[in-house]
Image: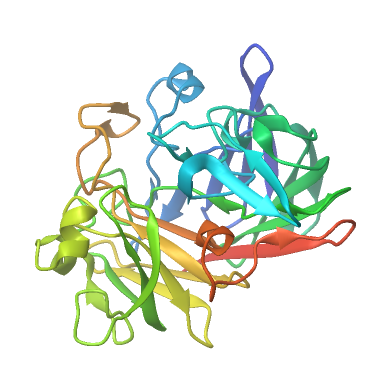
């Protein structure tokens, strides 16, 4: 196992964590961005299974959030406002009238402090950052640590911890676009996805949650027994049309907080485990076309995001898991990506 470090530009550094079985992951201290994830196929050939830019400079804007860490709150906050204990806070409006993914200067734009750790069985990158009170409009000084750990079982675990000196909303996640074909040889149409959920969150035509939960049974949003993602790219329902003929929806997990993904041509299997209450499934319906990526030009459905997180709908609607981190409490979440 080893850790490599490469200087990119200004204060940007890229760290590569590698194990003894052909898997490696490369991460920028800028935005905590996962730029590359090399995973063997059924024949032992390691290929990149995430979307990343050909030129590092393109991460400076990264309007599609490729590989980025998202915070303080992932997703869209309606009308860019939040209220807590009678106090109103106004956030940046960076998507129409709404606040998206922590704002234009959210965690995906931060240069994180970095340190590394290594043992016989795993290697880790630890990123840390302090977000100041009222930065991007959020209350409280928030100290955040994200640890990336790769082990010899071909498992990558992202561990999120945070603490604040005031009550504040928080919903952290990673925004990697996965494509298990390897080196972006095809779209994610043939990715078979299975996870336990009974409901997904209805959205309006601005992709803002209405607060209504829709039963997945008998719809293209039913994944309990598994389905091909491409089956959902047909505009069979209004919700698919709103999302650009695909998925960009929050699913509330059942008892098993686990997602299983299989791509038969490569033979790759990915299992995602988490303690997050749900997940946004996004099939790159709105991905800008023609971007120069490391493995070719971008196109619709070139990748799929499994954004395990709590949901900002909790700030405006009842019935959602709370996203308020109480003063001096510890926020602790994890996402593990396991490959077979």
Count of numbered labels shown in the rendering: 0
Left or right relative to 121: residue 330: right
Q: Quadrant of the C terminus?
A: bottom left
- Residue 50 spot, x, y in % from top left: 40, 46
Extreme-front residue of the structure: 86
* Residue 17, quarter of picture: top right
* Residue drawn at 26 percent across, 33 percent down: 288
Q: Is residue 205 in sight in this rendering? A: yes
Return the x and y of residue 250 as percentages of the image width and height. Answer: 41, 65
Q: Where on the picture, by quarter, is residue 202?
A: bottom left
Residue at image location 80% in from the left, 54% down from the top:
167
Residue 41 position, x and y percent, is: 36, 59
> Measuring 56% from the left and 64% from the top, which residue is drawn there?
314
- The answer to whether any part of residue 44 appears in the image is no
Residue at 52% from the left image edge and 85% from the top image edge? 256
Extreme-top residue of the structure:
10
Image color mode: rainbow
Residue 227 position (above or below residue 292) = below
In-image side of 107 versus 337 (left or right): right
Is 96 on the left or on the right of 116, as rendered?
Answer: left
Q: Position of residue 81 (x, y in %)?
A: 57, 44
């Amino acid at each position: 196992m080893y850790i490599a470090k490469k200087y990119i530009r200004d204060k940007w550094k890229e760290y590569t964590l590698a194990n003894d079985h052909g898997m490696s992951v490369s991460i920028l201290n800028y935005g905590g961005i996962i730029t590359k994830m090399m995973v063997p196929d059924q024949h032992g050939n390691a290929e990149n299974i995430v979307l990343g830019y050909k030129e590092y400079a393109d991460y400076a804007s990264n309007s599609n959030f490729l590989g980025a860490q998202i915070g303080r709150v992932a997703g869209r906050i309606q009308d860019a406002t939040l209220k807590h204990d009678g106090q109103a806070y106004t956030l940046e409006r960076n998507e129409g009238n709404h606040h998206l993914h922590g704002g234009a200067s959210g965690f995906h734009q931060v240069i994180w402090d970095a340190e590394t750790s290594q043992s016989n069985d795993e290697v880790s990158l630890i990123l840390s950052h302090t977000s100041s009170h009222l930065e991007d409009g959020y209350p409280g000084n928030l100290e955040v640590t994200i640890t990336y750990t790769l082990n010899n079982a071909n498992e990558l675990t992202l561990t999120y911890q945070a603490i604040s000196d005031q009550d504040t909303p928080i919903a952290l996640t990673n925004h990697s676009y996965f494509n298990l074909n390897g080196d972006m040889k095809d779209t994610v149409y043939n990715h078979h996805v299975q996870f336990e959920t009974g409901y997904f969150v209805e959205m309006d035509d601005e992709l803002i949650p209405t607060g209504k939960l829709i039963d997945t049974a008998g719809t293209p949003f039913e994944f309990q027994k598994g389905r091909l993602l491409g089956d959902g790219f047909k505009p069979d329902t209004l919700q698919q049309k709103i999302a650009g003929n695909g998925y960009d929806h929050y699913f509330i997990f059942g008892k098993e907080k686990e997602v299983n993904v299989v791509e038969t041509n490569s033979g790759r299997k990915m299992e995602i485990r988490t303690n997050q209450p749900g997940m946004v499934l996004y099939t790159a319906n709105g991905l800008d076309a023609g971007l120069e990526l490391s493995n070719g030009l971008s196109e619709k459905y070139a990748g799929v995001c499994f954004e395990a997180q709590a949901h900002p709908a909790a700030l405006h609607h009842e019935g959602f898991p709370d996203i308020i981190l109480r003063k001096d409490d510890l926020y602790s979440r994890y996402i593990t990506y396991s490959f077979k």
